[in-house]
Each structure stands twice: as structure tokens, then as C-alpha cells.
Image: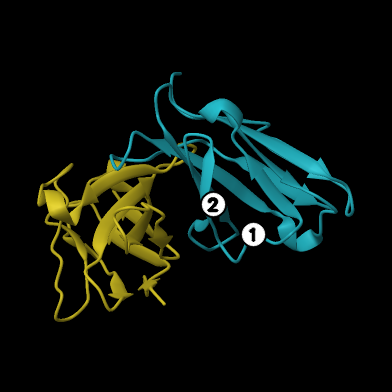
Amino acid sequence: AQRVTQPEKLLSVFKGAPVELKCNYSYSGSPELFWYVQYSRQRLQLLLRHISRESIKGFTADLNNGETSFHLKKPFAQEEDSAMYYCALNMDTGRRALTFGSGTRLQVQP
Amino acid sequence: DTGVSQNPRHKITKRGQNVTFRCDPISEHNRLYWYRQTLGQGPEFLTYFQNEAQLEKSRLLSDRFSAERPKGSFSTLEIQRTEQGDSAMYLCASSRGLREAFFGQGTRLTVV
């Protein structure tokens, strides 16, 4: 069965420091990976997906099939990046039923 | 707000009672998903619809749970004979085909 693991429940950094939110997955096929973000009192929203290979709000994520990882990175954290981040996997593009990790709370201190 | 709308936002019920939640997707979104999220966990998939057809149900969806999407528009999720373990945030999401899914703000259920 597919699984998404986010090993850190909380990541606290200072403003301007680099950020890396870890995500590992287990799935035997070719998954589609996503990062979702939830800011305080807001709904869950898509941040980025691996197939787009884009940078959103300065964040990037590279799918590493060898290490089965999809870590989220940003070189210089901003206070407004403080939020809950969820890594998610879609094992079948026909379904779009996502398997989420348990989330990492990012706190960016001034 | 033209996003996904869920009602009610909060529901407190006594154990054994039935509850029903409603989700209004974004207009013209043909796919609708239900997820459940418990404290400290990510959302867990429950079921999804394409138009009015319920195409898949998770093993998490016990016999006490039923979802409908009449006419392929809004959807309801009913839980019969609620148990304390049903306490969670219930999230709805919708998408146009395989495009990005947009989430609602959720209905928080507390079973006392």
C-alpha cells in the first residue's frame, strides 16, 4: 500500500534561514507528488506538484525516485511561510484520491 | 466566496445520533471528494464522485457512512449512529476532471 511519511511534526527556523521539509513515500509504481499548505484559519491549498517542476513562493521540490523522496525547499524563509505543510501522493492519475502525510508545521521566527 | 462551501462548519452531537454534512462544490466541477482529518494527521480519503456516480469508497467508510451527490451538484455525507471515534474534521474537495482539487474549510464534528 502507498504511504507518505513526513518525519518532522514541527520545524522552527529564523527568518532568512534555509528551509527543508522532508517527505518520503512508498509506492511501487510511478506516483504523482504534491505539496499542500494550510495557513492559519485558511483552507488547504495546493502549493506545487512535481510534474510542473515550478517554483511557487520561492519553494521548490524535486522528486527523487531513487530515494523515494519529495522534499520541499526554500533558500530564505519568510515569516509569512509559517503554516502547516502536507506532502501528498496520487498513485493513479485517473482517481486523484490523494494519500497525505501527517504534516509538518513550519514556524518562521523573526 | 465562490470556493467549495461546506455546512455546517461545526457540529456537536450525542453518541448514537445521525448527522448529515453538505458540500457545495465549485460550479462546473464534475469531481467531488470527501476526506476525514483527525487531530495530528493529514486528510484521509473517504470517497469520490464523478458527476452523480460514486466511483470509489475507502475501507474507512464503514456501513454507517453514506454519501450522495444527486444531480451531480452538491453532495451530502451522512453518518448514522455516531461514535466518539467519528469526531474529526470532514473535508470536501472538488475539481474539474484531473485538474487541481480545491478544498472547502471543512465541517468539524464532535461526538460527545
Question: In the rendered structure, are the residues bearing label 1 and label 2 in contact, judged by CB atoms less than 8 Å apart?
Answer: yes
Q: Is residue A62 left or right of residue B37?
A: left
Observer-nearest of B27 and A71: B27
Q: Amino acid at mark 1?
A: Leu
Residue at disc 1, secondary structure:
loop
Residue at disc 2, secondary structure:
strand
B106 in relation to B64, above or below:
above
Q: Residues within 10 Å of mark 2 (few under 14, many from 20)?
A: many
On residue B61, the disc is: 1
Q: Is residue A13 left or right of residue B18?
A: left
Residue B91 sits in which quadrant? top right
On residue B47, the disc is: 2
Q: Chain of mark 2?
A: B
Residue B86 sits in which quadrant? bottom right
Q: Chain of mark 1?
A: B
Quadrant location of the N terminus of chain A in the rendered image? bottom left
In percent of width and height, residue A36 lies at 33, 50
In percent of width and height, residue B58 lies at 55, 61
Label 1, label 2: how far apart the Cα atoms are? 8 Å
Q: Residue furthest top?
A: B1
Residue name at image x 25 percent, y 60 percent? A33
Per the rendering, the colour in which chain B appears is cyan
In the rendered image, residues at marks 1 and 2 fall on the same chain: yes
Q: Is residue B98 left or right of residue B32?
A: left
Which sits earlier in the primary sequence, circle 1 or circle 2?
Answer: 2
Residue name at image x 17 percent, y 56 percent? A50
Residue name at image x 88 percent, y 54 percent? B15
In percent of width and height, residue A54 lies at 10, 47
Residue name at image x 38 percent, y 73 percent? A2
Q: Identify the chain drawn in yellow.
A: A
